[in-house]
Amino acid sequence: MKNHNAQPEILHFFDTDGRSYFQQHGAGLLLADRNAHVGSLLVSERSFFYLNILYRLLLFKRDYELEPLYEDIYNGVLSAQQGLTPAYDQDQFRSDLNRLEQWDLVDFRIEKQRLRGYRDNRKRKFRYRLKNEAVHLLEWLEQRCLDDIQHRGLIRGRIPRF
């Protein structure tokens, strides 16, 4: 539901007459430039597997590894994924990562490598990065979790904001 002309129009929600603008037009513009697949992610049968991969990518990003290698991501999520199902393997990981890429939640690029000669048959190395929509979703989920914890009184004082 991409509507690139909605940007100037949506600013009316933040004016002093935002309430009257809402009454005339509804809240549909709030979804104008959002990735509809975020909903698919959350209701998917494999949502926990997908979230594990996305969250590990976020942790890589926070450690200043913006585009980790495929193998590093796999190694980083393997124990969490096998906690969900012991049979989790590279084929399932590849399928999960492909789905996230199809949903436009991650990007990938092929790392450029110098060939060492005509017999050089090294595999291509793929690097992945989170799209902004996925980052914001994960940060929102983290904040909801912290709010729940604070509401239950388990944390007192300052709660970190991401």
Image (cartoon, rainbow, N blue to C red):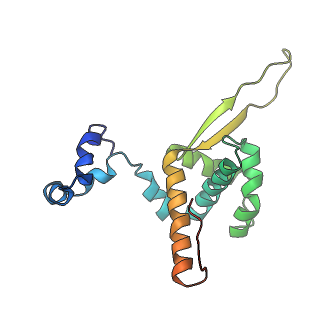
Would you identify the image quadrant in which residue 126 lies? Answer: top right
147 lies above or below 73: below
The residue lying at 59 percent from left, 57 percent from top is 50
The residue lying at 50 percent from left, 61 percent from top is 140
The residue lying at 56 percent from left, 85 percent from top is 153
Decide if residue 27 is on the left or right side of residue 132: left
Between 117 and 25, the one nearer to me in the picture: 25
**Residue 103 shows in the view:** no
47 lies above or below 98: below
| Residue at the outermost bottom position | 153
Would you identify the image quadrant in which residue 86 lies? Answer: bottom right
Pinpoint residue 145: horizontal percent, then vertical percent: 55, 71
| Residue at the outermost front position | 157
For the C terminus, the quadrant is: bottom right
**Residue 116 shows in the view:** yes
Decide if residue 139 is on the left or right side of residue 125: left
**What is the number of callouts on the image?**
0
Between 95 and 13, the one nearer to me in the picture: 13
